[in-house]
Amino acid sequence: MNLEGTIAHGAAQDLLNVVPTSAVLGAEIRGIDLKSLDNAQFEAFRRAWHQHEVLLVRGQTLSDQDLVAFSRRFGDLDWAPVQETGRRFVEGLPEIYIVSNVKVNGEPIGSLGSGEAVWHTDMSYLDVPPMASMLYALEIPPAGGNTSFCSMYAVYDALPAELRQRIATLKIKHDGTYNSGGYLRQGVTATNDPRTSPGAVHPLVCTHPDTGRQMLYLGRRRNAYLLGLELSESEALLNELWQYAERPEFSWEHVWQVGDLVMWDNRCTMHRRDPFDDTARRIMHRTQIKGSARPV
Ligand code: OGA
Ligand code: MN
C-alpha cells in the first residue's frame, strides 16, 4: 500500500485498503471478499469508485448469482445488450452478458470475439445508458486481451478554453449500429451515414450526477454525429476531440488475472480491449447497472 493512498483517502481508507494506480484514474481495493462487504464497507467502496472512476478487486470467487447480488447493491440491472450474436447471456440470468471468443459446437457463447474492441462507453445508444459495468474474469488468455480505461473528466479538463466554449452546448448522437468489436448488432440495418444511423442523442459535455464534475461524453467514434453541423464539420470536430481522448496520459491499462472484478463508471470513463490469439480462451461475465436518468 502506498502512503499517498493512506493520506488521500481518509475515511474510506479506515474501512477499506484503497491503493490508487499511478494513472489519472483507477484504484485497487485489497483484502476484501465482495460476497461479504458490510454496509459501511460498501458505502466506502461506492465513495472510492466515485473518486477513482474504476475499481479493481482481485482474487474473487463469485458465482453468477454472487455477481448479480453484489451488482444489485448499486441498483437495478439492465439486461445484456444485443450484439453480433444476438443477446448472449447466462442461461436463466439475462442480466449477465458474456464477453468471450469461445465457441461450443461452432456457436459463440458470447460476444466481441478475439479482435480489438475500440474505445467506447457501454450501451450509450440508449436514452438512459447504464451508470456502471462490472466485468469478472473467469478465463484469461496467456497474453493479450488487456483492457484500458480513460477518464473523460481528465480529457475534458485538458481541452483548451476556446474548444470547450465551442462544444459547450452541442449534442452528439451515439450510434447503435455497430459494437466496439466492429460488428453489426443483430437485427440492425448496416449504415455508414452518421446523420441517419439509429442511436441516442446526448449532450456532448455532461455533468456527472454524483460528483458534479464535467466530462466529455463521446460514446464511440464510428457513426457519431454532432447535431446541427454539416457532416464534414461534425467529422472534423469529432476528430479533434478524439485526439485528446486517445492520449495515453489519460488512461490506465489493466492486465487481467482470473478472479479479477473491475467496476467502471460508465458515464465518466471509456474503455477499449486489445486483441488476443483466437486459439486461446477468454471468458468474462458482465453486469450493467441501470442509470437513473438521461445524461445532462
Ligand atoms: C465490456 C467490454 C472489453 C473486454 O465488457 O463492456 O468492452 O475487456 N469488454 O472484454
Ligand atoms: Mn464495453
Image (cartoon, grey):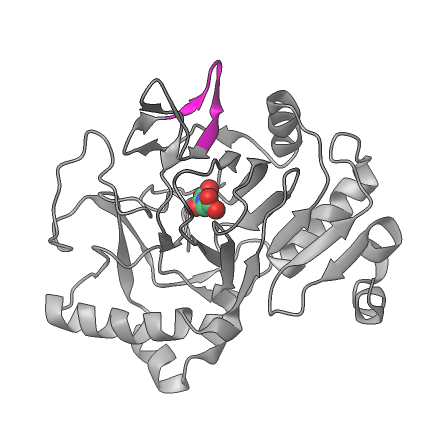
Extreme residue toward the right, this view: 14
In the image: residue 234, left or right of residue 70:
left
Q: Nearer the viewer, residue 101 or 287?
A: 101
Q: Which residues are magenta?
A: 88-98
Q: Which secondary structure type mostly characterizes the magenta part of the structure? A: strand
Q: Is residue 230 left or right of residue 157?
A: left
Whether residue 178 is visible: yes
Is residue 168 visible from the viewing direction of this image?
A: no
Q: Residue furthest front?
A: 279
Image location of residue 13, percent across then percent down: 84, 57
The quarter of the rendered structure image containing the C terminus is bottom left
User: Where does residue 14 sit, x and y in percent of width and height?
Assistant: 88, 54
119 vs 138, left or right, is left
Q: Nearer the viewer, residue 252 or 73?
A: 252
Q: Is residue 173 magenta?
A: no
The residue drawn where x is 42% and y is 48% is: 276
Q: Residue furthest top?
A: 92
Q: Measuring 66% from the left and 31% from the top, which residue is drawn there?
A: 70
Q: Position of residue 174 (x, y in %)?
A: 28, 52
Which image quadrant is residue 216 in?
A: bottom left
- Image-quadrant location for residue 119: bottom left
Placement of 28 over or under 279, stated as above or below = below
Residue 91 among magenta residues: yes
| Rendered residue at 26%/47% (across/down) | 182
Q: Position of residue 20 (x, y in %)?
A: 71, 63
176 over 87 or under it: above or below:
below
